[in-house]
Amino acid sequence: MASRIEADVAGDRSEPDGALFPQGFDYDLPPELIAQHPASARDGARLMVLDRAAGGVPTHSTILELPRWLCRGDLVVVNRSRVIPARLRAQRAGGGAVEILLVAPLPDAVGTEPHLQSRRWRALVRPARRLRPGQRVTLVPSAVTPEGTALAGLEVVIVDLADGHAEVRLPPGVGTLELLRRMGEPPLPPYIRRSAGATPEDRERYQTIFAAEPGSIAAPTAGLHLTERLLDELRRAGVEIAELLLHVGPATFLAGRPGRAPLAVEPERYEIPGRTRSLVAGARGRRRVVAVGTTTTRALESAARAGWPPGMQETSLVLAPGTSFSVVDCLLTNLHLPGSSLLALVSAFAGTDVARRAYATAVAERYRFYSYGDAMLVL
């Protein structure tokens, strides 16, 4: 049975020149269109192409045909952030199951900076109503974490609980990244349902091939489609590839929570390397900048608004209809949750009417939605 999903939300309040969907946005999304597994081949997804210069009428293609849609001299920018295995399984005294999703590190001590090896983390926990501050829960391995057997029995302390979040303290005696490598699972979003948790396949496929620096708790999903052979083909066609870094936050896991603003975005850290800054600066007015994903788009547009600062920065930028794009000329992206900041960005970039028509077409043509789903290219 189809589930009716509606979104009629305001645009970015920091740039209030328009509303997200002035006439409302409403589509029937059959649950079976939410992709539960990746395509059999990483580059095997369908691709809907929207050429804004031609009115944005959807054209059906495939990811393997991506080089056909790009031009010699185009600059393709990807996000090299690596997803950390941030989901831990534990048990309460008495045997009740607990899930802990690490969201962001906290400083270990006053005056120190948070980092991935911190023992203190902000987290989402389930079931929060059965936990209390000061409680200890015992880590347990899962089917996808056989290496964690030797660490089973280590305890995580629930330091505090407030506003749907928790502060947790990880056990001493093992580094945080080592603990996650051995005990953590890929933090699949809630719409990907696994009765027994993530699988070994998810460990590989919920990660881009260019993922390098750990820090994200959700994949930059447009990049999941790209393979070495596809990147090589783009290079042979005269397309240049550049990288940046944006560590993806928990927005996917928080979407739709009561009291949460529809377009709320958690602060996310990003960095534009010097080579990428130079290539983007040289591209303006000469060749197109093609952003692979909304995360890449937010990083580039945030950097432009901040004057292209070097080093690690932080952004809470929301791009919604009524805002303008000063860097990105083309966007490769997936099909997003209704009412989300990601769909707001796509609607701002493609145009609200074009986006609405494209999503209606995607449903009618049985495209696969969300993280493991099909893709869209907006030219």
Image (cartoon, helix red, strand yellow):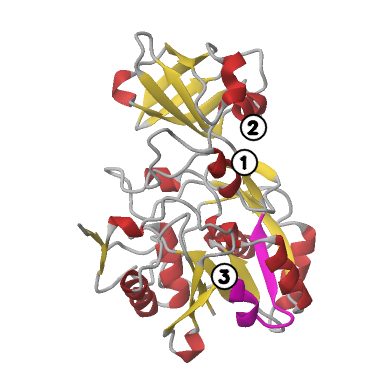
Chain part drawn in magenta? 63-79
Disc 2 target residue: 116
| Corner quadrant of residue 363 | bottom left
Q: Relative to 119, is 271 above or below?
A: below
User: Disc 3 marks which amino acid?
Assistant: Ile
Q: Residue furthest top?
A: 94
Q: Is residue 168 left or right of residue 195?
A: right
Answer with mark 3 or mark 2, whichever residue precedes in sequence.
3
Which is closer to the viewer, label 3 or label 1?
Answer: 3
- Residue at the spot x=47%, y=91% of the render? 54
Residue at the image position 25 percent from the left and 69 percent from the top: 24
Q: Identify the mark nearer the N-term, 3 or 1.
A: 3
Residue on which disc 3 sits? 63
Is 138 or 289 nearer to us in this picture?
A: 138
Q: Residues at badges 1 and 2 in contact (C-beta under 8 Å)?
A: yes
The residue singled out by tag 1 in the image is 215
x 61%, y 14%: residue: 150
